[in-house]
Image: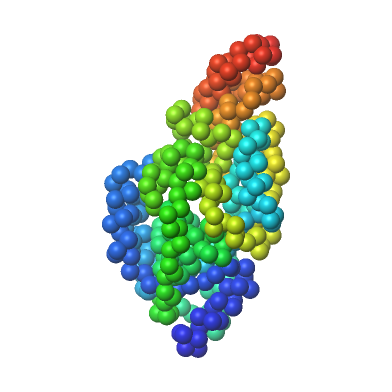
Amino acid sequence: MEHQAWIGQLRSWASELGFAALGVADVDLSQAAPGLKAWLDAGFHGEMDYMARHAALRTDPAALMPGTVRAVMVSIDYAPDDPDWVAQAWANLADPERAYVSRYALGRDYHKVVRSRLAALARRIEQVAGPFGWRAMCDSAPVMEVELARRAGLGWRGKHTLMLSRDGGSMRFIGTLYTNVPLPVDAPVDEHCGRCEACIQACPTGAIVAPYRLDARRCIAYLTIELQGAIPEAFRAAIGNRIYGCDDCQLACPWNKYAAAAALPDFAVRNSLDTAELIALFGWDRTRFDTAFEGSAIRRIGHERWLRNLAVALGNAPSSAAVIHALRSREQDASALVAEHVRWALARHALRSPSSAIGAVSPR
């Protein structure tokens, strides 16, 4: 089959596998390399040392997979299957007794779902064209996914640094298939953010320090997922009830009114995480956590950081006997990290309502 003819067939197969879009990009990232270097030099990657350690591989796909000449880029929808999902998400954020989990993490671990379907796409190509070099990835290797997706015409980079598309907003995962087959490339699409800065204004911690420039050290997604140790006190109040990730910049984006519901059942809500209460989740022991989040992206942070995040959220919750009781149950937690955040939370309640909150429960 001629390379040009492959593209139509590829898009057909991609659609059958649940992908929303497919495009092909060249892999000359020399123009993107200075921007990555400037971001790393500014220290915006925080503790994500792997970003700097593998920077050269990100900007040189052939160094990651020898012989790479093209990147087949795909996207897949993950928005909740509810026409009012944006309003529901804002309502959840507005209820300080509930836990907010980033919409992408409500279902199965997207890394595995996307990568396995990309591999299935590659095997279909092999059935027609014979063996060829390929590697399927989804946030699982040093790849400049958004830049390659932009080059492949899947969308443009929004001011929040995420990929945006006119027909799907930003509620899409990106997958990458490196290949040694010189497929014809697609053209990038025009940008459509205009003067809008809704995402910048919506960020609770001011992490979007300028259009298209994110300081991960201030980002709630980084603080609740990537950061290994204590969350800086300066950001704890702003975290609110966000216990895993943050969607504010996406919820505020006008383009997400076009976000399509997830086509795959894999991304359906598990463990009622879209309505779960903080106190209930804080009571989970390690076994319950590991069991509930089998096959979930959330499991990667581990039980200790899960409790750390919940302690912060409970410190931001309204003072009540139930909240104080929950916090005191872990005041002497074996984890120094958890205990420190619990003490911070209790101190917050003591300052807020010393008599009705702290006094509502007998001292231990």
Q: How is the image coloured?
A: rainbow
Q: Is residue 360 left or right of residue 208?
A: right
Is 252 in front, or is 131? 252
**Residue at the farthest front position:** 195
**Residue 351 in the image: above or below residue 126:** above
Q: Position of residue 271 (x, y in %)?
A: 70, 45
Report the residue that reaches farthest toward the bottom: 1
Q: How many marks?
A: 0
Image quadrant in which you'd find residue 364: top right
The reply to whether residue 79 is visible in this rendering is yes
Q: Is residue 181 above or below residue 95?
A: below
- Residue 17 drawn at (x, y percent): 62, 70
Residue in the image at 44% along x and 29% along y: 234
Residue occupying the point 55% across, 20% down: 348
Position of residue 46 in the picture relative to residue 169 (left or right): left
- Dividing the picture into quadrants, the one containing residue 43 is top left
**Is residue 112 shown to the viewer in this render?**
no
Report x, y in % for residue 361.
69, 14
Q: Position of residue 133 (x, y in %)?
A: 44, 74
Residue drawn where x is 66% and y is 51% of the image: 85
Q: Residue at x 52, y 67 (%)?
A: 74
104 or 249: nearer the eye?
249
